[in-house]
Image: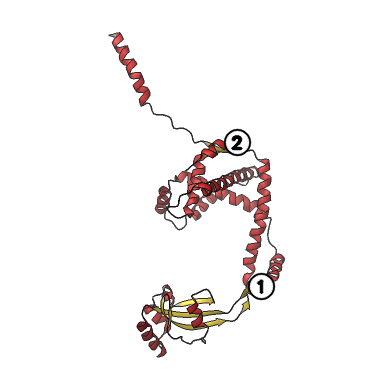
Amino acid sequence: MRFKNLFLLLCLIPLACLTRKEQPQPPAIIALVNGIAIKETQLRFRINLESMKYEENHVLKGKQFEGLKTEILNRMIDHRIIIDWGAQNNILLTENEKAEGIKNMKKGYTDHEFDMMLEERGIPYSLWTEMAEENIAVAKIIHETLMKKNNVSSEEVLQYYQKNIKDYAKNEQYRARHIVTDTLEKAQELHKRLLKGENFAKLAIMNSLSPDRANGGDLGFFEKGTHPVEFDQAVEKLEISELSPVIKSPYGYHIFKLIDKKPKQTQPFLEVGQEIRATLFQKKLAAVYESWIEELRIKAQISIIDETLENFSL
């Protein structure tokens, strides 16, 4: 009897081995930055997130995939280095900054819509939060370290404006209303009513097929070449408050009324100064950032696991 029980026990051992669940393998490491691992799951998630900018069924492959993989991995390495540098210099995120930053990133979505978007792309919320907090931290460190110390002076802005003043020349501009119909008969009927003095904006709201009918057909100010050529040809012949005849375009039949006109002019400095300042600041920041991150990279301990990177796929 004792041997029989032993025999049964021996028979069950292989079965137990077969039914034992295999322990999940930890994610492979793609790179080490100052001793901190960047894992393949993190890289895969970032690539999936980046691929959202492509069309829905677009498949990343070949040189496009390899290029994106390298670009994102380098960005992750840079972010890791910057965050380490921030910690060493006591530039840290507060809980309020994290919460506010994540709230801004999710702006335009309800919580349910955002969760569904991530789920459709197979992105765990925990990984998204990790990435979001990393980006918020990097932005704060760059702001504290570089942006505060690299302001653009008013003199620099004025010099740029004077040197590039031809770029701020504007052609003649027109402001007009229009009504669009799908038949010549309808357009002619409305044209007669307008000639009798009916309100153009009201007729546009009630009859126009164009989306701008909500604004009474107001096209705002525009230069030649920004609308179909038929628009320009009709409007440039009009005096202010004058009606055009019925004009045919690829969109239907139009009636135009010129509301205002601006002659050729150069945009004044006060109008474009802030735009110039922002442009110069971005150029200056980009140059300073490149030299700064290169210096941090030289000091950092970076190790890329080539075999894991070569075998990496989505």
Identity of the amino acid at label 1? Lys
Q: State the residue position of label 1.
A: 166
* Residue 61 vs residue 79, the one in the foreground: 61
Instruction: Give the answer, above or below, for where 303 lies relative to 109.
Output: above
> Label 2 neighbourhood size at 10 Å, few (<14), some (14-19), many (20+)?
few
* Residue 13 vs residue 130, the one in the foreground: 13
Instruction: Give the answer, above or below, for where 72 lies relative to 257.
Output: above
Q: Is residue 211 visible?
A: yes
- The residue shown at (55%, 49%) is 135
Identity of the amino acid at label 2? Gly
Counting from the top left corner in percent of width and height, residue 237 is at 52, 85
- At numbered mark 1, what does the secondary structure look like: helix, strand or loop? helix
Disc 2 versus disc 1: nearer the observer: 1
Task: Describe residue 232's horizontal placement relative to residue 290 as left or right.
Answer: left
Q: State the residue position of label 2.
A: 35
Q: Is residue 95 visible?
A: no
- At numbered mark 2, what does the secondary structure look like: helix, strand or loop? loop
- Looking at the image, tell me whether mark 2 or mark 1 is earlier in sequence order: 2
Label 2 – label 1 distance at C-alpha: 53 Å
Name the outermost residue toward the left: 1
Counting from the top left corner in percent of width and height, residue 103 is at 49, 53
- The residue shown at (30%, 12%) is 5
Counting from the top left corner in percent of width and height, residue 93 is at 57, 47
Counting from the top left corner in percent of width and height, residue 181 is at 38, 78
Color scheme of the displayed model = secondary structure
Instruction: Give the answer, above or below, for where 19 lies relative to 293.
Output: above
Which mark identifies residue 26? none
Q: Quadrant of the N terminus?
A: top left
> Label 1 neighbourhood size at 10 Å, few (<14), some (14-19), many (20+)?
few
Name the outermost residue toward the front: 62
